[in-house]
Image: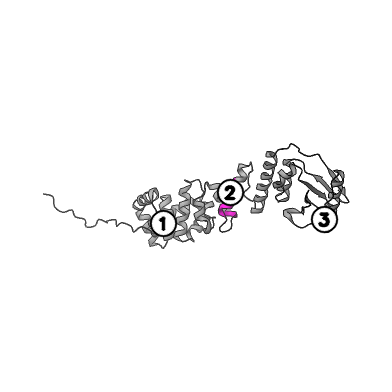
Amino acid sequence: MTGPIDTRGVEVQQPLSPPEWYSRLCGQHRSFFAGRLSLLHDAVLAARRDGLEQLVPIILALGVDVAEIRAQLGRHVWRKLHHADEDVNFRRVLIWLRFEGGAAWDEIVTVPQTHLRSCRNAVDWPTARYAARLADVGRFLQVSMLYRDTIKMGGAPRDGWSLKRLKREHDRRAVSLAINDADSGTWAPAYTVTVGDYVFTRLTSDRDLVREGKTQRHCVATFREDARRGACVVMACTGAERATLRFGRSGDRELGGFANSQVSAECLAASLQAQREFERSQGLRSHSCPS
């Protein structure tokens, strides 16, 4: 009969208590970290003993000890990880796992803490990285969409661009596509009149109206049907000042600069004269007399 096994002098490995964040895991991530906790028992224990609890998520994710983390990731990344708390490093690990190593650690550590969750949920790492750099708090999704839409339209956003520069490229391509998609067939005869330093040119196609609306940031293109059937006339004002003029048979009229901003008194006077000249050329009763 075999007697009891003598375990004197044999070190028995005690199971590690899981980190606080472990309870937030589920599915494959939970299984992954459970296995790593057992496999990397000594490395985790040593980190805790040395007061480096914040590095435990990195140890478990990479499968290496503290010394190897510094050797693999370099001094810059090491300092970022070392000075962060455990929860931040855990969320960084989730990003790394989400993109299966496609996200480099020297990029992950630059993500602001406010965007860590959003980066993890992003469709791809290039989008996440770009939005994290440019987006204010609460604007991550909007910047992501701006970035992806720019690419879909054939753009290639550069890493050094500001948000303003990205928006400008997005809008430029959107205008170009909208103009190209609009019908270029004319539905009214061309007309141009010069009043002093101002030149008024009638817009005579869907493409003209779309270009004017996109360029000047207003909704003049919504008057397309009225303009087609002659219920109103739309003119682009160039020269001394840039503006858009619209007037209708009923006497209603609008004159606005960029984004419907107010124009100068000189531009207003020139637009009234241009309208009178047009109505006279068409044999119409003038509605342009100032009230």
Residue ID for mark 2: 145
Q: Predominant secondary structure in magenta?
A: helix
Asked if labels 3 and 2 touch by Cβ distance under 8 angstroms, the answer is: no
Q: How is the image coloured?
A: one colour
Eye-nearest disc, 1 or 3:
3
Residue 130 seen in the figure = no
Residue at figure coordinates x 38%, y 49% from the top left: 27
Name the amino acid type tagged 2.
Met
Q: Where is residue 227 in the image (x, y as percent from the top left)?
A: 75, 44
As measured in the structure, the alpha-carbon distance from the residue carrying label 2 to the one carrying label 3 is 39 Å
Residue ID for mark 1: 56
The mark that comes first in sequence, 2 or 1, is 1
Residue at figure coordinates x 70%, y 41% from the top left: 179
As measured in the structure, the alpha-carbon distance from the residue carrying label 1 to the one carrying label 3 is 70 Å
Place residue 281 in its image quadrant.
Answer: top right
The mark that comes first in sequence, 1 or 3, is 1
Residue ID for mark 3: 268
* Residues in magenta, as a range: 132-148
Residue 117 seen in the figure = yes
The mark that comes first in sequence, 2 or 3, is 2
Going by the image, does 43 lie left or right of 74? left
- In reply to whether residue 137 is colored magenta, the answer given is yes
